[in-house]
Image (spheres, rainbow, N blue to C red):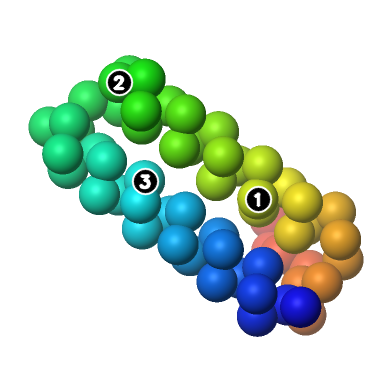
């Protein structure tokens, strides 16, 4: 399950990077914002699930 969630996060991160490039580094483009929100939600779900092996260093 951990690997599946990490893979989903990585896929969403890659798509976000691709969208930023496609939209000429326009971080305010609606597609970029939408993907960023999705990535944030995936990361938050992963964090709330307690699946990570170590606590993040802040």
Q: Which residue is mark 3?
A: 16
On the rendered structure, is 36 left or right of 19?
right
- Quarter assignment of residue 47: bottom right
Q: Nearer the viewer, residue 27 or 54?
A: 27
Give the SS element for disc 2.
Answer: loop
On the rendered structure, is 45 left or right of 39?
right
Give the SS element for disc 1.
Answer: helix
Residue 29 on image: x %, y %:
30, 21
Q: Which residue is mark 1?
A: 42
Badge 1: few (under 14), some or many (20 or more) residues near its Cα, within 10 Å?
some
Q: As displayed, is residue 9 above or below residue 24?
A: below
Residue 34 on image: x %, y %:
47, 29
Q: Quadrant of the C terminus?
A: bottom right
Q: CA distance from mark 3 to mark 1?
A: 13 Å
Kindly identify the residue that appears in the image at 17 percent across and 42 percent down: 21
Q: Which residue is mark 2?
A: 29
Q: CA distance from mark 1 to mark 2?
A: 20 Å
């Amino acid at each position: 399950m951990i690997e599946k969630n990490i893979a989903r996060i990585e896929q969403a991160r890659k798509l976000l990077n691709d969208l930023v490039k496609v939209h000429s580094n326009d971080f305010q483009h609606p597609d970029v914002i939408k993907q960023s929100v999705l990535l944030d939600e995936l990361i938050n779900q992963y964090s709330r699930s307690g699946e990570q092996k170590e606590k993040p260093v802040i």
